[in-house]
């Protein structure tokens, strides 16, 4: 049966592609999976607009039309790209515009730097093979905050992060420590960052050695060598920071926790992951692995 075959391929291919190949509807597949329950009916333009506005508000204006289409479909309603684009355009609904942000890297130091082993290979074939890190700065009415993150390139999940009022070495070691305790990867993982003094510091390099990690660093002045992490900061600032005022550092920390742990890792649809969230993408991969190869 077509639907059964689709079910067996879900871990390897996006649902829309599978349905297109077999010339069946996604709503029909979902109805079959629910045991023959009726699929949700096609929404009128007025109903679709209410749903679009609800998602737009729920996700704080983070989604443009491609992610909006996928989110509507995930909620069980048929939706075409052209229709969603039209309704959003006619009603002035759009994602927040991305802006350029300054680089915080301080590479003017005499500490040893590592070669660029990653070489822009941003698509490892399993979790815990390549982690990337970076730091950015953020303003509150109480003063600056600095955010360091650790990203697993496999599913673009933020596995570790730290917020501090000073950009010292402990901000990056704390983020790495959080990531290690969450994942406990085997020795040999590659950790990639820029050449900033925090990452070149003796404390951070010692931590990498303790965890059995291999150090890789971007070439001097080349932000594209760490593009996925730079892109993450751009999305974070665009979707939660730009245009907002934070009275206190604690207020900002609460927002950062909500964005990273509640929204981004668990819910935000990622185009690189076939419009799945980082957690869902990892779960799908784990479910497809033999039991003895599964990782936490």
Image: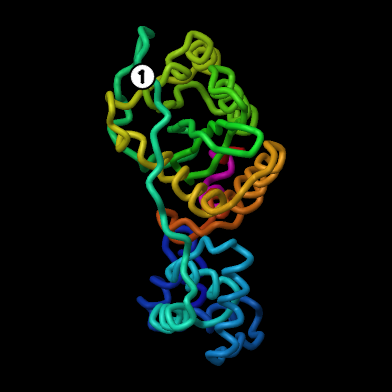
**93 or 272, which is in the foreground?**
93
Residue 84: image x %, image y %? 45, 79
Q: How is the image coloured?
A: rainbow
Q: What residue is drawn where x is 51% and y is 59%?
A: 269
Q: What residue is drawn where x is 58% and y is 49%?
A: 265
Q: How many marks?
A: 1
Q: Is residue 289 magenta?
A: yes
Which quarter of the figure has residue 22? bottom left
Residue 122, placed above or below residue 241: above
Q: Is residue 290 magenta?
A: yes
Quadrant holding the C terminus: top right
Which quarter of the figure has residue 124? top left
Q: What residue is drawn where x is 62% and y is 27%?
A: 164
Residue 102: image x %, image y %? 39, 37
Residue reaching furthest to the bottom: 44
Residue 111, placed above or below residue 134: above
**12 or 263, which is in the foreground?**
263
Q: Which residue is mark 1?
A: 107
Q: What residue is drawn where x is 44% and y is 40%?
A: 153
Mark 1 packing: few (<14 Cα in 10 Å), some, or many (20+)?
A: some
Residue 127: image x %, image y %? 49, 39
Residue 1 in view of the camera: no
Residue 134 in view of the camera: yes
Q: Secondary structure at mark 1?
A: loop
Question: Bounds of the magenta span?
Answer: 285-293
């Amino acid at each position: 049966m077509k639907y059964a075959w689709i079910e067996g391929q879900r871990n390897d291919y996006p649902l829309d592609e599978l349905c297109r190949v077999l010339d069946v509807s996604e709503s029909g597949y979902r109805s079959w999976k629910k045991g023959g329950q009726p699929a949700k009916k096609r929404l009128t333009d007025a109903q679709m607009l209410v749903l679009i506005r609800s998602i737009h508000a729920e996700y704080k204006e983070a989604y443009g039309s491609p992610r909006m289409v996928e989110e509507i479909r995930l909620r069980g309603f048929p939706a075409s790209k052209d229709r969603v684009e039209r309704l959003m355009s006619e009603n002035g609904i759009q994602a927040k515009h991305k802006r350029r942000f300054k680089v915080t890297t301080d590479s003017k130091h005499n500490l040893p730097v590592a070669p660029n082993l990653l070489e822009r290979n941003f698509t490892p074939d399993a979790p815990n093979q390549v982690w990337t890190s970076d730091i950015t700065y953020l303003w509150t009415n109480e003063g600056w905050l600095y955010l360091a993150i650790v990203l697993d390139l496999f599913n673009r999940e933020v596995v570790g992060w730290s917020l501090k009022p000073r950009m010292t070495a402990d901000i990056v070691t704390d983020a790495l420590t959080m990531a290690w305790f969450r994942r406990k990867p085997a020795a040999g993982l590659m950790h990639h960052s820029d050449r900033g003094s925090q990452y070149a510091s003796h404390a951070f390099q010692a931590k990498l050695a303790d965890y059995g990690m291999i150090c890789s660093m971007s070439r001097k002045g080349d932000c594209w060598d760490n593009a996925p992490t730079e892109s993450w900061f751009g999305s974070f600032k665009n979707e939660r920071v730009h245009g907002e005022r934070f009275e206190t550092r604690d207020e900002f920390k609460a927002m950062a926790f909500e964005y990273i742990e509640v929204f981004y890792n668990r819910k935000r649809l990622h185009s690189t992951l076939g419009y799945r969230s980082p957690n869902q993408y990892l779960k799908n991969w784990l479910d497809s692995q033999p039991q003895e190869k599964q990782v936490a």
